[in-house]
Image (cartoon, rainbow, N blue to C red):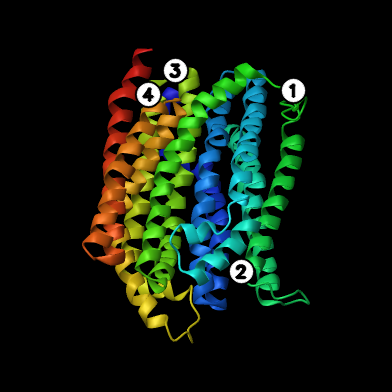
Amino acid sequence: MAQTMTFPAHLRATLVLGLPLIGGQLGQMLIQITDAVMMGWYGVTELAALVVATSIIFVILILGSGFAWGVMPMVAAASEAGDDVQVRRVTRMGIWASLGYCLLALPPLLLTPDLFGKLGQSPDVAALADRYFAIALWGVVPALLIMALRSFLAGLEHTHVVLWVTLLAAAVNAVLNYALIFGHFGCPELGIRGAAWASVASQCAAAMVLIWYARWKEPQREIFRRLWRPDWVAFAQVFRLGLPIGITSLAEVGLFSFASVLMGWVGTLDLAAHGIALQCATATFMVHLGLSQAATVRAGRAFGRRDALLLAQGAKAALLLSGLAAVMTVAAFLSLPETLIGWFLDPADPQLPQIVAIGVSLLAAAALFQVADAAQVMALGLLRGVQDTRVPMIYAAISYWLVGAPVAYLLGIVAGLGGVGIWLGLASGLILAGVFMMRRFWTRAVPRLAAA
């Protein structure tokens, strides 16, 4: 039946699966965007501290997320084969691997004094960033649990709940931010610490709702039954697939976090503008990431039934949708930069014109790599669907850290181009990664499945 699907049917299937995932990604971004907007209203120095602190937390989160995201293609393939036992096994061990990562990674970071001072940030920014970090880092635990449950549900094509739960978490975060940052509703004015507490609370709420939903919607899978018992065979499968995913994601996210550190060296206003422009670029990237996850599920099901035609046609549909989104993003970044940046700042802030001027140039640079960024994340999603993660990890390391990071440093710091030079370095790494990943999918993954 899948082989007879028309191309419009592939587009519809991708959209039905992908739109809630896109919405869920954008909803998750609302938490970070709300933090940035409200912190920008509270103070520019606080915004700069938030930017650099969340960049490091995101690196930590992304490295551990590989085990959770590895669950998605394995659940999709096992579900297509009718193997409920394997679905349960890999999901449970995905949760194990994610929580085990937290036990190893978080304590050393919490015990490191003056972390952001050691990263070269100015004393006032470093002190605020340390306060935020000490609280918000605990949110990594519920965040990774959320990712594992989202992967389980998305692999079974239950994507609408991902959207609604994430929007609920974003709403909770916004209300708590308003109360705790500024001291409304009888709450103390906690400033940047209020933003940290709000983010942790919203993540915990989302995790509890997803646990309830997974137990209610999929009782036959019984993913929480005997959760305390190890399954080392399934754990090894999750680890082998998930670790390269985490390292691949870390290579890209680490590049952007490295750019945030470089921007801190350039200046506080530049770092604030970078944070705003990065929020805009990341929000549009969530569209491609949601489509990439839909492509992972559909590719995983094609892989489970060994259907190369279904894989290729589904990939073309996902890539077309992602390409259209990239074109619209480029148009917005080039035509409405002042409007986009102005949303994040108090109109009465005397530093507004300087930050907007810097941000406009950064959004112009971001427009250059939208297509390449979309191509690399879509190819990654498709390759994960066919459980090909090791070589893409190598491609990511080469593209981002042997090319992107050095070019960003040379252009931005050595050549003195500042933020624009740093962002052009980011573009060079993304373009190379897009070429590498897309070539591997079409010249290796699809032909191999056709020959199987």
Quick one: label 1 or label 4, which is nearer the N terminus?
1
Task: State the residue position of label 1.
Answer: 229
| For residue 302, side relative to residue 391 (left or right) | right
Q: Quadrant of residue 7?
A: top left
Mark 2 vs mark 1: in front: 2
Image position, residue 417 (x, y; %) = 24, 65
Task: State the residue position of label 2.
Answer: 192
Q: Image point 49% across, 87% down: which residue?
A: 348
| For residue 201, side relative to residue 280 (left or right) | right
Residue type, mark 1 in image: Arg
Asked which secondary structure carries label 4, the reply is: helix
Asked which secondary structure carries label 2, the reply is: helix
- Between the residue at mark 2 and the residue at mark 3, the CA separation in whole angstroms equals 51 Å
Q: In this orientation, does residue 13 appear?
A: no
Quick one: label 2 or label 1, which is nearer the N terminus?
2
Task: State the residue position of label 4.
Answer: 309
Residue type, mark 4 in image: Leu
Residue type, mark 3 in image: Arg
Relative to residue 404, is residue 149 depicted above or below? Answer: above
Q: Image point 76% across, 41% down: which residue?
A: 212
- Between the residue at mark 4 and the residue at mark 2, the CA separation in whole angstroms equals 52 Å
